[in-house]
Amino acid sequence: MSRVLIGTVTALSALAAAGCADTPSDADYGRSVNQMIQAQTYDPAAAANPPEQPPMTGDGARLENALTTYRGDTAKAGEVKREAEFTVGEK
């Protein structure tokens, strides 16, 4: 075997062995997601200490906009564009 071939085989073997390295068992894959949720939460203690009564006042236009947006993504009766098709087994 030539030296180039031996060097190539050695390099490929080293790369293959490095690819099989174990991932640390203490790796925290959700850390960035949790940090983003905490950064976007207005009052982190609100979930632990909810108010006894809901707010008694609110901006009507804002609340109407929230309800319109919430209800806007749902299909109304009779708006199904394609019937559901269920098949069991082969056709």
Image (cartoon, helix red, strand yellow):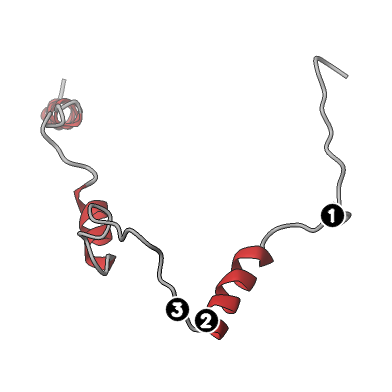
In front: label 1 or label 3? 3
Reply above or below: 47 against 58. Answer: above
Q: Mark 1 points at which residue?
A: 77
Q: Mark 2 points at which residue?
A: 62
Q: Position of residue 77 (x, y in %)?
A: 84, 54
Q: Residue at x 19, y 49 (%)?
A: 31
Reply above or below: 21 against 81. Answer: above
Name the residue type under label 3: Thr
The mark that comes first in sequence, 1 or 2, is: 2
Q: Label 3 to label 2, Cα distance in Å?
A: 12 Å
In front: label 1 or label 2? 2
Q: Is residue 56 left or right of residue 46?
A: right
Q: What element carries label 1?
A: loop
Q: Is mark 2 on a helix, strand or loop?
A: helix
Q: Label 1 to label 3, Cα distance in Å?
A: 33 Å
Q: Name the residue under label 3.
A: 57
Q: Where is residue 57 in the image (x, y as percent from the top left)?
A: 45, 78
The mark that comes first in sequence, 1 or 3, is: 3
The answer to whether mark 3 and mark 2 are in CB contact below 8 A is: no
